[in-house]
Amino acid sequence: AFLERGEFLNDTVIDWRVLRVKLEDLAEQPDVLRRCHFFNSFFYKKLNPYHGESKSRRYDDSHRPKIMYDAVRRWVKDLNLMEKDFIFVPIHHLQHWSLAV
């Protein structure tokens, strides 16, 4: 049902593929895996609360960094991203998926 003709990729398929890269493709390279962090497909949506909103509904831009940090604070509280060489972030925008690394 997920990949039938006329169906779009959804977050479940994307998260499964990212997890597969983590657990299968990099499983035999623990030194590389330690240098990576994988967010799921909901991270970007949480990080960017303005994603998909019209400009008229947005908050004052001076508050934007705090709003963005507050949205993901719990996701990164026990994680030092500066120790990672690769951070994987699946992004869904305008019906297209991208993977930011």
Image (tube, grey):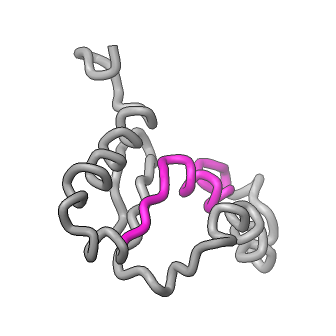
Q: Position of residue 17 (x, y in %)?
A: 30, 43
- Which quadrant holds residue 72? bottom right
Q: Position of residue 70 (x, y in %)?
A: 77, 67
Q: Is residue 77 left or right of residue 34?
A: right
Q: Is residue 14 left or right of residue 73?
A: left
Q: Position of residue 56 (x, y in %)?
A: 75, 55
Q: Residue at x 23, y 16 (%)?
A: 5
Please, is residue 6 above or below residue 77 in the view?
above
- Asked whether 16 or 57 is in front, the reply is 16
Please, is residue 9 above or below residue 2 in the view?
below
Q: Is residue 31 magenta?
A: no
Q: Residue at x 36, y 44 (%)?
A: 96
Please, is residue 41 above or below residue 3 in the view?
below
Q: Is residue 46 magenta?
A: yes
- Which quadrant holds residue 55? bottom right
The span picked out in magenta is: 36-54
Please, is residue 72 above or below residue 1 in the view?
below
Q: Is residue 7 left or right of residue 52?
A: left
Total marks drawn? 0
Q: Quadrant of the N terminus?
A: top left
- Which quadrant holds residue 85? bottom left
- Asked whether 67 or 88 is in front, the reply is 88
Q: Residue at x 74, y 74 (%)?
A: 61
